Amino acid sequence: MRNLMKKYNYVPLLVVLFSLGITSCMEDLPRYNEFTGYEFSSLDPNAGQWKLVLHSSPEQIALASPSATGSAELLKELEDVKARSKNATAAQREAVAYWTNNPLVRWNEIALELATKYNLIPAPNPDGTYPVPDPTNPSKYPKFPYSHPPYTSRMLAYLSVAQYDGLIMAWHYKYKFKRQAPYQLDTQIKSAYEANGLYSYPSDGAVAAIASRDVLTAMFPLEKDYLAQKAQEHLESLLVAGIHVASDLEAGQLIGAGVAKTALARASTDGMKNAQAPKAISDSIKNAAKARFGWSWENQETPQRLVGLVPLFGRVRLWNVPNVEAIRPGPPPAPGSPVFQEAVSELKRYANTLTPNQRRIANFWNDGLNTYTPPGHWNRFAKEEVVANKLNPVRTARVFAYLNMAIMDAGVGCWDAKYYYHYPRPIQTIAGFKTILGTPNFPAYTSGHASFSGAAAEVMAHFFPGNAIQFRKWAEEASMSRIYGGIHYSFDASAGLTQGKQAASFAIAKAKLDNAE
């Protein structure tokens, strides 16, 4: 594995771009062409029998039988592919190289780029209050969405689950109908990628293109035109590459649209639209915690946002954890207690003696504004493991689905604990204390970085056990980074890691029973 700093040059590049004001058009964002396709380590012919997440049957979205080999309809489609390949422009050939034979990776990258673009806090109003993005009017300032860590975790979960269900369905039909790819049916057609013999009907790439387009458009409505253009580019590349004919694409688009519709129907009722509660509800949550424990978090910002970040995210519907109480940790130590004082002494010690390496870790794992947030950081890890292990699209989708379901579940559990306990941040309880990072506008316990990372590391360790030690080391480092930065107490971090691991255990238990192992 590459060393830690070399592995993550992606975030600083995006930060530099945004610091220059390059945020108006997604074409301005970097494209990552460090791989152009590869030979799959396995085709997973039984993937059509894997258990779905959102659907009950791989034929819940029905497809008609494709036209027969040798039929006039198919021969005409093959001629079209030959013509497209022969007459392809330089831009079309570049698109073939970009999308590769595992386009799930590219759609995940696009999702991370969008999360980065929209991860911005709006400027305060003249009266010191902060405006809130309005999903019913996304172009009104501040533009919708604000892709903070909870939002990004949810976006990635819905995207990945839709892709996963769609590709299971695609694999089911591929091995049911067994239509050979164009390059197998006509020797004049050459595959742009490693010829692997995967059946072509329906097109798994078309499933990914349409499912991704539709889910991401719902999550980032102002990017509708950009996403439509990327999906069209992707679809066209599948014909130019010689791996699909038009009817393969039509069938794949049908599945992609269907799974996205199911995913977005769930999203519309999962409680996220109520997560950013008004001040009256936010105050009632705070007062309940103060009556229960005798303390409460007070925002230390200037100017101060009167409501913390998504106070009711802890009530959003979970994926695999049965209920939020199942991963809610016990209470943190009371301010002034011996355990608390020990944690305070630790923070003061780091503030006075922080080493260059500890400062680097704090800054490196910050994942703050204009980044793809901690959930995106771990998706970047997953992408690199997918490419290194040459996973096919359906197995790639499985990794991203379980990873992002676990990350979102951990985030929901973390935000439940944050507002249930309403624990103050160090700058509130330690007189004169200063951090080296900006302090978030929500309670301390538990640490979001630790919760997200604890969940992600365990899921990654399950899928890529050879690197389990490294993943867990990174999770520990991510959690410690918040202590080095003065944002969290050590018990915020340790409880967050445990909470994340617990969330992951439910996802991993499901994965062990989904017929893929």
Image: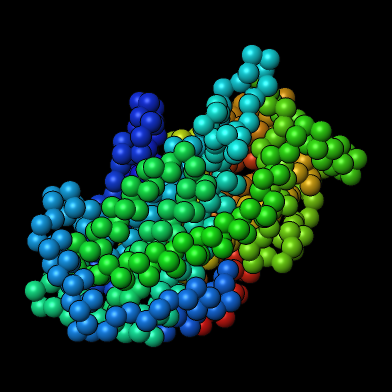
**Residue most toward the right?**
291
Question: In screen coordinates, is 483 left or right of 1?
Answer: right
Q: Position of residue 49 (x, y in %)?
A: 48, 83
From what the image shows, is residue 193 above or below residue 158?
below
Examine the rendering and report whether any part of residue 235 can be seen.
Answer: yes
- The answer to which quarter of the image holds residue 291 is top right
- How far from the left and from the top, in percent, is residue 283? 82, 34
Q: Is residue 485 above or below residue 466?
A: above
| 42 and 248: which is toward the camera | 248
Judging depth in this view, the residue of 199 and 128 nearest the camera is 199
Which sits in the foreground, 260 or 393?
260
Colour scheme of the rendered structure: rainbow
Q: Residue at x 27, y 84 (%)?
A: 68
Taking the image as drawn, is residue 511 in sight?
A: no
In the rendered structure, the answer to whether residue 63 lies left or right of residue 28 reads right
Quadrant the N terminus occupies: bottom left
Q: Position of residue 75 (x, y in %)?
A: 18, 76
Work out whether 370 lies above or below 300.
Answer: below
State the residue at coordinates (44%, 68%). Answer: 255
Q: Is residue 417 left or right of residue 232?
A: right
Residue that appears at 17% across and 66% down: 80
> Horizontal placement of 186 versus 1: left or right?
left
Total marks placed:
0
Residue 304 x %, y %: 68, 23
For residue 465, above or below residue 125: below
- Which residue appears at 22% of the width and 64% of the height? 239
The furthest residue to the front: 72
